Image: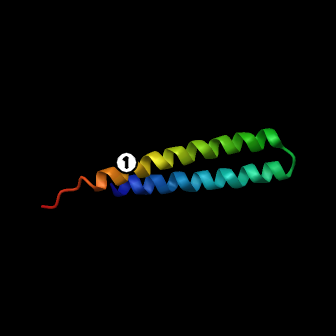
Amino acid sequence: MQDLHKRAAEQHELAAKSHRTASEHNEKGDNDQGRWHAERALEFSDHAYKLAKEAHNKSGQMVTL
């Protein structure tokens, strides 16, 4: 489960980086590249959400020995 949290955090970081890059391209007027990076950011964010949700669901299923 800890691995799921770590992977989710990594995906969140990639999403943030893609958002920043999209913003930089848009500020320069390069809207096509900005849009491409924004789409990647959404994909990373969606994947992070799925991993975090899976980790949360599994944390409720833990059994103590």
Residue 50 percent across, percent down from the top left: 45, 45
- Locate residue 59 relative to residue 22 in the image: left or right: left
Badge 1 crowding class, 10 Å Cα cut-off, few under 14, some 14 to 19, many 20 or more, is: some
- Locate residue 32 relative to residue 16 in the image: left or right: right
SS class, disc 1: helix
Residue 27 percent across, percent down from the top left: 84, 53
Q: How many marks?
A: 1
Residue drawn at x 80%, y 49% is 25
In the rendered view, tell whether residue 65 sits above or below residue 28: below
Q: Which residue is denoted by mark 1 in the rendering?
A: 54
Q: Which quarter of the figure has residue 39? A: top right
Residue drawn at x 35%, y 58% is 2
- Quarter of the picture holding the C terminus: bottom left
Q: Residue furthest left?
A: 65
Q: Amino acid at mark 1?
A: Glu
- Locate residue 31 relative to residue 12 in the image: left or right: right
Residue 37 percent across, percent down from the top left: 69, 44
Q: Which quarter of the figure has residue 63? A: bottom left
Residue 41 percent across, percent down from the top left: 63, 46
- Locate residue 5 relative to residue 61 in the image: left or right: right
Residue drawn at x 41%, y 56% is 5
Residue drawn at x 70%, y 55% is 20
- Quarter of the picture holding the N terminus: bottom left
